[in-house]
Image (cartoon, helix red, strand yellow):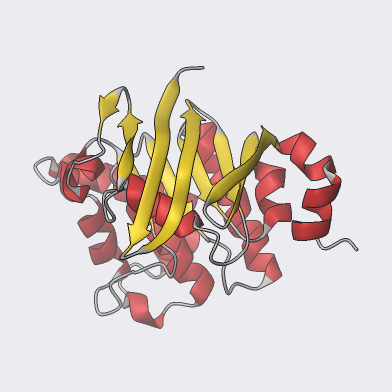
Amino acid sequence: MSVVLEMKNVETYYGKIQAVKDVNISVKQGEILALLGANGAGKSTILKTISGLVRPAQGTIHFMGEDITKKEPHSIVEMGLIHVPEGRRIFGALTVTENLELGGFTKKSDKSKTHKNIKKVFDMFPRLAERHKQLAGTLSGGEQQMLAIGRALMSEPKLLMLDEPSMGLAPIIVLEIMKIIKRINTENNTTILLVEQNAKAALKLAHRGYVLETGNITLEDSADSLRKNDSIIKAYLGAH
């Protein structure tokens, strides 16, 4: 499998506080890669660094073989690297359809492509189709998460980065979201980098995983091996 994304010796700071320490990560074509860790471990900072929202102090990031370390966020999006941030960040005062149209801004010159992609999103999320004229701010938490993912799919991502997609959702909705993530990976052959505190759900989906502790990668292995690892079980899978 070819490498879609590669981070080499990346360090990121907020002021004088180091959030990411000498991180090396590779994401392979067609896989779901899980990035696990406790709150404050630096998982979200890694995604923000990849998508250009935060600049690394050192190290390099390559996407599809191209150096994106100093690229602007909009240029990175146009290359097909899409980031669904923690907290969904949908536009509450716009309708479901208007949110999706904004997600397709990289294809805005091709209206037929935008309409086709909206149809694809509605096929994947029938609940959004039912609520297509509804203001996004009036949707439930699960529906807002579906909209955030659907909006990301409008840009036809080569790599989709999801930051805590299960956060704040009821267990039954978490299952639904995880099934959708799996479907996006298998049906669209979309490579996915998944940041998730729900380690059990993430490792059921993922092919491989990295464990992050206070900004450092401390472990990398197949998802199956991580599920059976005693220290991972104790720290993240709820066993004592």
The residue depicted at 58 percent of the width and 67 percent of the height is 39
Q: Residue at x 58, y 56 (%)?
A: 196
Looking at the image, residue 37 lies above or below residue 208 = below
Please give left or right for residue 103 compared with residue 3 in the image: left
- The residue lying furthest to the bottom in this view is 138
Q: Is the C terminus in the top left, top right, bottom left or bottom right quadrant?
A: bottom right
Rendering coords of residue 159 (x, y %): 40, 37
Q: Residue furthest top?
A: 1
Taking the view exactly as shown, the residue that stands out farthest to the left is 109
11 or 153: nearer the viewer:
11
| In this view, 100 is above or below 220 | below
Q: Where 145 falls versus 73 (above or below)?
A: below
The residue depicted at 52 percent of the width and 37 percent of the height is 185
Q: Residue at x 40, y 67 (%)?
A: 88
Q: Is residue 121 above or below residue 30?
A: below
Q: Position of residue 206 (x, y in %)?
A: 64, 40
**Relative horizontal placement of residue 235, taking residue 66 as reference (left or right):** right
Q: Is residue 105 left or right of residue 39?
A: left
Q: Position of residue 74 (x, y in %)?
A: 18, 48
The answer to whether residue 73 is left or right of residue 187 is left
Which image quarter: residue 213?
Answer: bottom right
Name the residue nearer the viewer: 155 or 37. Answer: 37
Q: Is residue 120 visible in this depiction of the protein?
A: yes
Tally of numbered tags: 0
Name of the residue lying farthest toward the front: 16
Residue 165 point in image, percent of width and height: 52, 60
Residue 153 seen in the current view: no
